[in-house]
């Protein structure tokens, strides 16, 4: 299927028309990472401090960047997981800094291992190790472990959904919210929106290649729900959720379906669908009206959950 670019928000479309399509393969993923790192903009001038720590994991230490606006005690906390299709991206994520500043909370951003060098379950196990560390070290971190949320965007949202499932099935730490921003949760893309071949930023072909690298193959319906949360058969007992996605996102239908399944399972869930927004469009044009609406929406949901 071919996406009609006239359906995109005008403020976002102008930027997308100037960018080449993103093509990521096993052969070029290392080069793509280096290119993105070289083009990463400097941090915005927010008054946020950063502390570089390490968390013990099953396969060695996991780097975690801790962002804070203040050192006030017993502040709420967010475990933040960056996006990048499970194969690229960095925990030095501007959104982690924005959240810490806007809500005066502690944000622990995890530098989890990436595929294809480290396929599933490396990534979610790193993230779960960071959650365990946060819950065991609340006093040292200065956080209130009764007010902890987990969240992420794109693949980070997929990891957040997966770790919420892992947590329910393991220690079941009390999480206030799973904040899923256009999460990458379905390895099949067997939906109408999942068929777009010319999709801005993240099309079906690119997504399937990323899934193959992450899953180290194509298990289809047999993929673990800890890798692709859409494969979970039981969503009962999960923490409250906030799910957002753009109306022109490749993930639209699968994300809406997941939110509906959460609600059917009795999980409180807020669902927001933003018109004219393609995948991660707000990251490219953060000052666009629709981008600002998205940011206000998830910050309000998180603030309510952590109060």
Image (spheres, grey):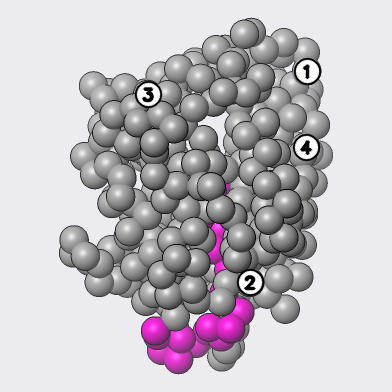
> Dot 4 corresponds to which residue?
274
Residue 187 in view of the camera: yes
What is the distance, in whole Å, between disc 3 and disc 1 at their CAs?
Answer: 26 Å
Q: Locate residue 84: give its quadrant.
A: top left
Residue at the spot 61% in from the left edge and 51% down from the top edge: 180
What is the distance, in whole Å, between disc 2 and disc 3 at their CAs?
Answer: 33 Å
Residue 209's label in the rendered image is: 3
Pick the quarter of the image with the C terminus: bottom right
Relative placement, left or right, of 206 versus 296 is: left
Q: Are marks 2 and 1 in contact (CB under 8 Å)?
A: no
> Dot 1 corresponds to which residue?
7
Decide which of tag 4 and tag 2 comes sooner along the chain.
2
Residue at the spot 53% in from the left edge and 83% down from the top edge: 145
Select label 4 or label 3 by which is in front.
Answer: 3
What is the distance, in whole Å, between disc 4 and disc 2 at their CAs?
Answer: 24 Å
Residue 212 in view of the camera: no
What is the distance, in whole Å, between disc 4 and disc 1 at their CAs?
Answer: 12 Å
Relative placement, left or right, of 40 versus 74 is: left
Magenta segment boundaries in residue numbering = 136-160
Decide which of tag 4 and tag 1 comes sooner along the chain.
1
> Dot 2 corresponds to which residue?
176
Residue at the spot 81% in from the left edge and 39% down from the top edge: 289
């Amino acid at each position: 299927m071919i996406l009609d670019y006239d359906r995109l928000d005008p403020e976002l479309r102008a930027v997308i028309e100037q960018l080449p399509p993103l093509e990521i393969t096993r052969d070029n993923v290392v080069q793509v990472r280096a290119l993105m790192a070289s083009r990463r903009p400097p941090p915005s001038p927010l008054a946020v401090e950063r502390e570089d720590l390490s968390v013990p994991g099953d396969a060695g230490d996991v780097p975690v960047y801790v962002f804070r606006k203040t050192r006030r005690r017993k502040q709420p906390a967010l475990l933040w997981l960056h996006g990048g299709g499970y194969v690229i991206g960095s925990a030095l994520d501007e959104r982690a800094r924005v959240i810490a500043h806007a809500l005066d909370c502690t944000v622990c951003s995890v530098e989890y291992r990436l595929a294809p060098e480290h396929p599933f379950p490396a990534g979610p196990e790193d993230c779960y190790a960071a959650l365990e560390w946060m819950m065991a070290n609340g006093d040292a971190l200065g956080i209130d472990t009764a007010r902890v949320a987990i969240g992420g965007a794109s693949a980070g949202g997929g990891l957040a959904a997966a770790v919420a499932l892992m947590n329910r099935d393991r220690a079941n730490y009390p999480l206030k919210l799973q904040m899923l921003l256009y999460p990458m949760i379905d390895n099949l893309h067997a939906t109408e929106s999942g068929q777009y071949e010319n999709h801005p930023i993240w099309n079906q072909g690119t997504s399937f290649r990323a899934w193959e690298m992450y899953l180290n193959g194509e298990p289809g319906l047999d993929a673990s729900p800890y890798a692709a949360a859409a494969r979970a058969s039981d969503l009962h007992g999960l923490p409250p959720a906030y799910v957002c996605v753009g109306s022109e996102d490749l993930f639209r239908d699968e994300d809406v379906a997941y939110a509906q399944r959460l609600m059917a399972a009795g999980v409180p869930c807020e669902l927001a669908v933003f018109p004219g927004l393609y995948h991660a469009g707000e990251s490219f044009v953060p000052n666009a009206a629709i981008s600002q609406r998205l940011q206000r929406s998830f910050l309000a949901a998180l603030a309510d959950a952590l109060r």
